[in-house]
């Protein structure tokens, strides 16, 4: 093991040691569970902006606030706020209902 790591460090470009340098194949992507696959299938055919909105709204409902939802989604809270403002400008609908201000 020590020799394999040493060789990868010598053969690499000075950056991170990746699985390929160690002669390892990358891990296959996880297989989604049946409910997740059904949920994803239900989204096929919807415009991306609608899917994005559904996911963000669901995350805010699940986590209770935009900052917590942003953290779970790997976004900054300001991204969620900008999206919400664009939805209001585009549709006139605040997307989150009357409790939006309570979830900020």
Image (cartoon, rainbow, N blue to C red):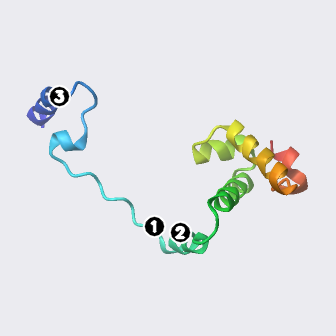
- The residues bearing labels 3 and 1 have C-alpha atoms spaced at a distance of 35 Å
Which residue is tagged 2? 36
Name the N-terminal-most of marks 2 and 3: 3
Provide residue 7's location: percent of width, then percent of height: 10, 31
Instruction: Tell me if label 1 and label 2 are in contact, CB under 8 Å.
Output: yes
Q: At 73% across and 56% down in the image, what residue appears? A: 57
Q: Residues within 10 Å of mark 3 (few under 14, many from 20)?
A: some
Q: Is residue 83 above or below residue 48?
A: above
Which residue is tagged 1? 32
Q: At 73% across and 46% down in the image, what residue appears? A: 83
Name the N-terminal-most of marks 3 and 1: 3
Instruction: Tell me if label 2 and label 3 are in contact, CB under 8 Å.
Output: no
Which residue is tagged 3? 9
Left or right: residue 89 versus residue 46 is: right
Label number found at residue 79: none
Q: Is residue 28 above or below residue 39?
A: above
Provide residue 82's location: percent of width, then percent of height: 74, 41
Q: At 57% across and 43% down in the image, what residue appears? A: 74
Left or right: residue 47 versus residue 81 is: left
* Residue projecting furthest to the top: 14
To which quarter of the image does residue 93 belong?
Answer: bottom right
Q: Which residue is nearer to you in this view: 41 or 69?
A: 41
* Residue projecting furthest to the right: 98
- The residues bearing labels 2 and 3 have C-alpha atoms spaced at a distance of 39 Å
Instruction: Tell me if label 3 and label 1 are in contact, CB under 8 Å.
Output: no
SS for callout 3: helix
Provide residue 94's location: percent of width, then percent of height: 85, 53
Q: At 25% across and 39% down in the image, what residue appears? A: 18
Quarter holding the C terminus? Answer: top right
Q: Residues within 10 Å of mark 1 (few under 14, many from 20)?
A: few
């Amino acid at each position: 093991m020590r020799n394999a790591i040493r060789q990868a460090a010598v053969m690499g470009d000075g950056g991170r040691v990746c699985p390929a340098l160690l002669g390892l194949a990358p891990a296959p992507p996880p297989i989604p569970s049946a409910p997740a696959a059904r949920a994803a299938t239900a989204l096929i055919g919807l415009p991306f902006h609608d899917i994005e909105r559904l996911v963000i709204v669901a995350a805010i409902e699940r986590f209770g606030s935009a900052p917590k939802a942003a953290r779970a989604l790997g976004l900054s809270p300001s991204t969620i706020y900008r999206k919400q403002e664009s939805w209001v400008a585009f549709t006139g609908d605040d997307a989150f209902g009357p409790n939006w201000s309570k979830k900020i």
